[in-house]
Amino acid sequence: MELYKEILSQLILEKGGEEYQVLHLPEAQSMVEMACYKALQEIKAVLVDDSLDDADCFQRIERIICIFESLGSDVGSRHDFG
C-alpha cells in the first residue's frame, strides 16, 4: 500500500494539488492504475532495449529505478553506481 500512496501523492503534486483536495476513490484508483500501466510499459521498453548488452545491465537497472522515482517511490541508494 506504501507504493500506492507514493504514486498517488506524486500524481497529485504533478497536477498542482489544489483541485485534488477532494479525490474520490474510483478517480484515485484510475489515476494510480494508469500510472502503473505506463510504468510497466516503460520498464518493458527498458528490458527489451537491445542497445545495451549484458555487460551494461546495470544501466537497465538504473533506468528502471528512475521509473520508480518518477512515480514518487524512493527505492533507496543501493542503485547508485556512479
Image (cartoon, grey):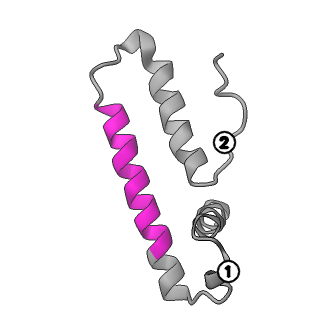
Quarter of the figure with residue 30: bottom left
Return the residue nearer the eye: 17 or 3. 17
Most frequent secondary structure within the magenta stretch: helix
> For the magenta stretch, what is the residue range?
31-48
- Could you tell me residue 35's position as x and y percent? 46, 62
- The three-letter code of the residue at mark 2 reads Val
Residue ID at (55%, 38%): 65
Which label is found at residue 75?
2
Against 80, is 29 above or below?
below
Residue 37 on the magenta segment? yes
Cα–Cα span, label 1 and label 2: 27 Å
Left or right side of 52 for 66: right
**Callout 1: helix, strand or loop?**
helix
Circle 1 residues within 10 Å: few <14, some 14–19, many ≥20: few
Quarter of the figure with residue 4: bottom right
- Could you tell me residue 51's position as x and y percent? 30, 19
Residue corresponding to mark 1? 18
Return the residue nearer the eye: 51 or 16. 16
- Could you tell me residue 44's position as x and y percent? 33, 41
- The three-letter code of the residue at mark 1 reads Glu
Against 67, is 25 above or below?
below
Which label is found at residue 3?
none
Residue ID at (53%, 79%): 28
Residue ID at (38%, 45%): 42
Left or right side of 52 for 6: right
